[in-house]
Image: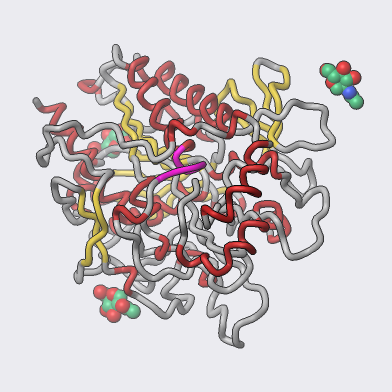
Amino acid sequence: MGSTIPLFKEQSLFVRTKKVLPWILYALLPLALLRLYFYPLPFPPSPETELPHSSTPITITTHSSLSSSSSSSSSSSTPPLFSSPSSTSEKEKGGGDDENERGCDYFNGEWVRDLRGPLYNGSTCSTIKEGQNCFKHGRPDSGYLYWRWKPNRCNLPRFDPNAFLQLIRNNHIAFVGDSMARNQLESLLCMLSTVSEPKLVYRNGEDNKFRKWQFVSHNASVSVYWSPFLVHGVEKSSSGPNHNVLYLDRVDERWGKDMDQIDLLVLSIGHWFLHPAVYYEGGSVLGCHYCPGLNHTEIGFYDVLRKALRTTLSSIIERRGGGGGRENNNGIDVIVTTFSPAHFEGEWDKAGACPKTKPFRNREKEVEGMDADMRKIEIEEVEDAKGRGKEFEGFRLEALDVTKLALLRPDGHPGPYMYPFPFANGVRERVQNDCVHWCLPGPIDTWNEIFLEMMKKWERTAME
Ligand SMILES: *[C@@H]1O[C@H](CO)[C@@H](O)[C@H](O)[C@H]1NC(C)=O
Ligand SMILES: *[C@@H]1O[C@H](CO)[C@@H](O)[C@H](O)[C@H]1NC(C)=O
Ligand SMILES: *[C@@H]1O[C@H](CO)[C@@H](O)[C@H](O)[C@H]1NC(C)=O
């Protein structure tokens, strides 16, 4: 916290008092719900739309001299759950000192110019979700497409769709999680479809939340399961309660029931944990996050994210760990994609909420605040589950630690181009912005480049 965002210098007083939160915009949710995630709002606050400062996990303090008085008063009312200063700007784990191509730390590096551009574009790939098809929606700049991720001490090879398909031959990969999981899946589909056409073989749920494709050429399947908590949960709805309900001790069987038919799982969650929710564990209420009017204890969402991941990874180990190992082709690989920071710089419904057109330099921005805390929990739970799963040959688990490389890409979001030609009739007073998801093509393609390298490494290790 406390980092200076130069853009804000002149507005810092405004921003300071407004406590702009990098809360989440979900294109999947109705507009009414959006109001909840961005506090405060230009329209009159109501009990449902107001998020109290005490539940504020992060405040953007933009100018140290100004922030000292007022933001410390707000952070002093922040429950201990929300602050873990030790995690701020934490150095990445992994990698080690013997960095060669094999032991490369892919998660620290820099975005560098690359004139080659993406493997696909918004008119060649047919599976891009509308809200992320920035090209088709008239985003005028294209510079954000010409960067590649350069890890500090090695090179990240360009995505090779044939190599990827070869590695998943006869296998089923499932992306499970929230809309970030879907975003990553759609990037992968676009890149793979440059060499082999995916065939949609299953589709279910509102907004195609459950889908499966086959790559007949390689007898491989790729699917996506909507499960924003991974554990069993009931998402808030306009007809039901105005908060989510999570059951932290059991996995969501919408995907869990298919676990024995999945060879590789990519889990990606995080943003939905910020929403108001009531949590159950062992049949009784454990607490809640922002549930005024309900007689539950506020426990924040960090421990909840931790429990949800632990339950999920434990269930996978239980159900699949002892399943027979690699040689029977009966193991399971699990990738946990870490938290991908949002880049709201101002009001979410004003033009220019994420206006940058270039990446940050490596040192310009550190992972901190809520982004760091969410990531840290995910990394810790992955490490913990690795320990628990060690005895099982058929179980492999790694974190796809994208938090830093994502943080450095404020330029990669749809912003107002989540909708087609938002300024066709001039710049309006209000315009919705998506500064959370990624344009396709866009920086998220790199997640899958690293994903492929992780799979290659597994393959090499298995052959040794
Ligand atoms: C998209 O890619 C196709 C095939 O490479 C190319 O013909 C087309 O011009 C591209 N479109 C844009 C807008 O870049
Ligand atoms: C295709 O993959 C499935 C597993 O996903 C396997 O059971 C089946 O034998 C494979 N078919 C061929 C022809 O290899
Ligand atoms: C709230 O919960 C406490 C402890 O469970 C209980 O004593 C109290 O009566 C409850 N209050 C209301 C209004 O339900």
Q: In the image, is 20 to the left or to the right of 126?
A: right
Q: Position of residue 385 (x, y in %)?
A: 39, 21
Q: Is residue 37 magenta?
A: no
Looking at the image, the residue that sits furthest to the bottom is 425
> What residue do we see at 79% from left, 49% from top?
48
The residues colored magenta run 367-372
Tell whether 457 sits left or right of 407.
left
Q: Is residue 130 visible?
A: no
Quarter of the figure that contains the C terminus:
top left
Eyeballing the image, is 90 above or below 422?
above
Q: Residue at x 68, y 23 (%)?
A: 280
Image coordinates for residue 287, horizontal then vertical, percent: 70, 25
Number of numbered markers: 0
In the rendered image, is residue 7 in sight? yes
Residue 393 on image: x %, y %: 26, 17
Q: Quadrant of residue 44?
A: bottom right
The location of residue 310, given as percent across then percent down, is 48, 23
Q: What secondary structure predominates along the stretch shown in magenta?
A: helix
| Left or right of 367 in this view: 455 | left
Q: Is residue 146 above or below residue 90?
A: below
